[in-house]
Image: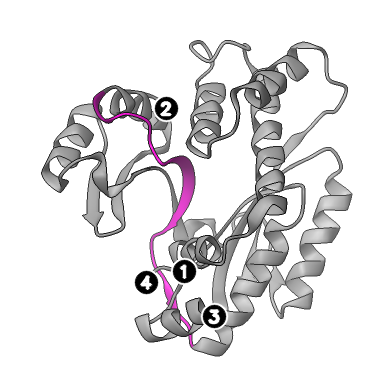
Amino acid sequence: MAGHSAFKNIMHKKGRADAARSKMFAKLSREITVSAKLGLPDPTMNPRLRLAIQEARAENMPKDNIERAIKKAAGGDTENFEEVRYEGYAPGGVAVMVEALTDNRNRTGGAVRAVFTKHDGNLGSTGSVSHMFNHVGEISYKPDAGSPDAILEAAIEAGADDAVSDAGGHLVTCSFDSLGTVAAALEKALGEAASVKAVWKPSLTTPVDEDNAQKILKMIAALEDDDDVQNVFANFEVSEDVMKKLTAA
């Protein structure tokens, strides 16, 4: 099981409750505000904003919150956020990618470096691990969205690259550049998605044992707890037996 997906499954099962939901909404709002500020406040004319809104809706973010985030940009918000990507290694030689939106690079860089150091990792230079990932779009649907064949057909018609189905649901993959249009086409065909995300998908993975898997999960949780960090991706692979232990813990 791929580490990125495994981590998300564990966190959903442990249920990070209201505080985590509030933090997630804050990060989604920041992305919406930045997207609206960089382009037009109209999602039909701004692909990045459209994608940010799609992701927020998939996470059940209230419409009022979305509208406030857009108006914040239109109202001349004084905060100037910039995108920063950090790359490095976690225990076991696992590659880690961290995406952040920050108004203070020194603060965010120091905080990210501190997490890597505390959890026996090493922060590298930009480009040090990104060659091990592909930037793609992932759109997920719940099992009742349709049969595997119906989902695959809809994905192909929408311009996606692939669709995989299992007992947990359906996952449609497409190029990063086409994520907005593919997600919009799928919404017309299948209804609203469970999630719409741009992700760094590992092109090769690193197997880890239970001890390193626990360390990596703690490191990712600490990174994601930082208000400036938007997303964390890692290329670790864990066995089903280890996953069961970690999920039960």
> Residue 80 lies in magenta, yes or no?
no
Indicate which disc residue 1 carries. 4
Q: What's the residue type where badge 3 is placed?
A: Ala
Q: Are marks 1 and 4 in contact (CB under 8 Å)?
A: yes
The residue at which mark 2 appears reads as 180
Q: What's the residue type where badge 4 is placed?
A: Met
Indicate which disc residue 3 carries. 1
Q: Residue at coordinates 23% horizontally, 53% vertically from top-left?
A: 165
Indicate which disc residue 213 carries. 3
| Disc on the earlier residue, 1 or 3 | 1
What number of labels is visible? Answer: 4
Determine the CA span between mark 2 and mark 4.
27 Å
- Disc 4 residue crowd, few under 14, some 14–19, many 20+, Cα 10 Å: some
In this picture, is 211 found above or below 183? Answer: below
- Disc 1 residue crowd, few under 14, some 14–19, many 20+, Cα 10 Å: many
Query: Could you say which quadrant of the image residue 35 lies in?
Result: top right
Relative to residue 32, is residue 153 drawn left or right? Answer: left
Q: Which residues are magenta?
A: 189-209
Determine the CA span between mark 1 and mark 2.
25 Å
